Amino acid sequence: MGQRNSIKVQLLSVPDCPLVVKVRSTLDDCLAKANADATVEELVGDYNSPTLLINGFDVTGRPPAAQGLTSCRLDLPNEEQILAALRGLSAISCDDETEAGVAVVAFRILLRTAECVKVEHVSQEMGRKMDDIMTGIRALQRRGHILLDNEGFIIGVGGLSSIPTDHDLSIDGRRFWAWCAFDVIGIFGALQASGFARSVDPSTNENLVVNFVRGVPDETGLKVFMADMPTGGSVCYDWCWRVRFFQSESSAEAWAQANGITGSLISVANLMASAREAWSSVLRRPAGDSPCGERQCRSAQLAGQLPGVTVNGVRSPPKELEARKGRGMEDNASGSGSGEAGCPALLSFDEMPEWFTR
């Protein structure tokens, strides 16, 4: 995430499709605006035409067509959908298998417990040695994929946080936080979860509430500023505080200008598909093998069967987690947790991004 990932763009069409020119022109404009490191490939054959894929994903969110079926598409991708995919799909991607596995397992543990994650638990669920896990964690830290407190507990990973930030989440009755607005939409969307997110327009300080029903937000007219990623920067420290909800284009422009930030303003409606895909790819990704290759990671086997959370629907959290959640969240809020029931004290953690709520 902290380094620019190469993006693969494919424009699919049938021979002599008259709509390709328009899509190609829009794509060229978006590539220039996003300053994306992308390879573009145009393929002519039996396709739904035209179709634009970024990292294999149809930017409109349309499901893949059955092989061999062709049709003329009138639902051409618009500029915001393309920019959302260019800026967002690689946001939490990771090419290294060990690092990706650590991030996936830590995310799943945090999601099912709503508490800080012990590194030992990641090691146990992956069936990997602690040295291997710590190597992956250090690499993830450098990129801003994962955040640890001063006692070594994982307090955030892949945009999901167990400690307060500017984006407060209630997912199926359980409390989490997110690093940025893109995380909010992607996490709810990938889980198809119901609940709400509380945030704030940083330009007007107006409180915002976005309700979700099975992963779909009701406030699709809100805007999200998808900022440029600083070269060599950290997602958590250098990017997330820039990716915010706004009520209007004018408030976003004023805030971006005041802070010297560049990027693209995209409506929630046009951001939904790419955000959902970014986190769905994490949740469905195998988390790796044990060192001897004899068994799949336990988290991968349990994907879609997390207590209280389901990837393909919504169900209430189990009673034991509800009871533990109340205690753990009080610990989070007070900073007095022991590490078993909640987070350890965070008051001495002096490297916390400033947008985390104290």
Image: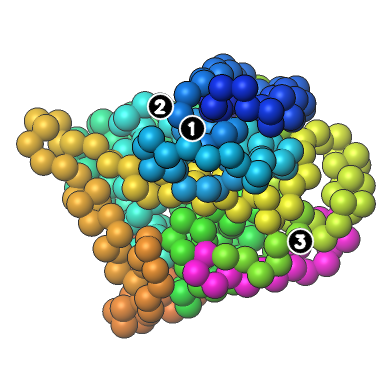
Q: In this view, does 95 lie above or below 130?
A: above
Left or right: residue 191 compared with residue 308: right
Using the image as rendered, state which of residue 225 and residue 242 is in the foreground: 225
First-in-chain label (1 vs 3): 1
Say what amino acid the circle numbered 3 marks. Answer: Gly
Left or right: residue 281 compared with residue 196: left
The answer for how far apart the CA atoms under marks 3 and 2 are is 34 Å
Which callout, 1 or 3, points to the residue nearer the camera?
1
319 in the magenta segment: no
**Residue 355: image x %, image y %?**
68, 51
Using the image as rendered, state which of residue 4 and residue 24 is in the foreground: 24
Residue 221: assigned label: 3
Indicate the secondary structure of the residue bearing disc 2.
loop
Indicate the secondary structure of the residue bearing disc 1.
loop
**Residue 230: image x %, image y %?**
68, 27
First-in-chain label (1 vs 2): 1
Indicate the secondary structure of the residue bearing disc 3.
loop
The answer for how far apart the CA atoms under marks 1 and 2 are is 29 Å
Secondary structure predominantly adopted by residues drawn in magenta: strand
- Residue at label 1? 47
Q: Is residue 59 above or below residue 283?
A: above
Within 10 Å of disc 2 (Cα), the crowding (few <14, some 14-19, many 20+) is few
Image quadrant holding the C terminus, namely: bottom right
Q: Can residue 150 be seen in this view?
A: no
**Residue 227: image x %, image y %?**
72, 38
- Residue at label 2? 95
Which callout, 3 or 2, points to the residue nearer the camera?
3
**Residue 217: image x %, image y %?**
62, 66
Left or right: residue 11 compared with residue 256: left
Say what amino acid the circle numbered 2 marks. Answer: Asp
